[in-house]
Amino acid sequence: MRIRALVALAALTLYGCGALKRFAYEGIGRDSWQKPAEVIALLDLHPGEQVADIGAGGGYFSFRLADAVGPGGRVYAVDVDDDMIEYLRSRAQREGRSNVEVIRGEYGDPLLPDGRIDLVFTCDT
């Protein structure tokens, strides 16, 4: 527990509140209990599909979903937190992820395009 607290404090000090939020969402060892590869496999996504990741946070699943739908598909990474929106946009741009569209949703409306979504995904939201 001490190590987690020290990592969180270091993230806050070095990178600000957005980094602390991402740490809180992704944590240490999340892959071991969340099993993202298994989750993505169970979704049975196909190239070209359109997926909405509601409550995308730091993109833990968004970018994995984007890999699953390929360059011809699209992932709408939706969040209401401005820090996470900024992070998602910069990460998508930095990684050249043209199939990830970041949306600043509202609490009562994710602002998704009508009639385009094949799957709505949410986790820990």
Image: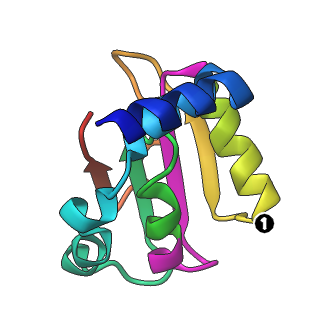
Q: Is 118 rendered above or below residue 18?
A: below
* 16 drawn magenta: no
The x and y percentages for residue 96 are: 78, 66
Quarter of the figure that contains the N terminus: top left
Please name the residue shown 23% across and 70% down the image. Answer: 39
Q: Residue at x 44, y 67 (%)?
A: 65
Q: In the current view of this chain or complex, which residue is farthest to the top?
A: 107
Decide if residue 94 is on the left or right side of residue 81: right
Look at mark 1 in the image and give the residue it sits on.
96
Quadrant containing the C terminus is top left
Mark 1 crowd level (few <14, some 14–19, many ≥20, 10 Å Cα): few
Residue 5, position in %: x, y?
41, 30
Camera-side residue: 44 or 39? Answer: 39
Q: Which residues are magenta?
A: 67-82
Mark yes or no: residue 29 visible: yes
Q: Position of residue 107 (x, y in %)?
A: 37, 16
> Can you say whether 105 is above or below 44 in the image?
above
Is 67 drawn above or below residue 57 in the view shown? below
Residue 104 image offset from top left, x and y in percent = 57, 27
Q: Amino acid at mark 1?
A: Gly
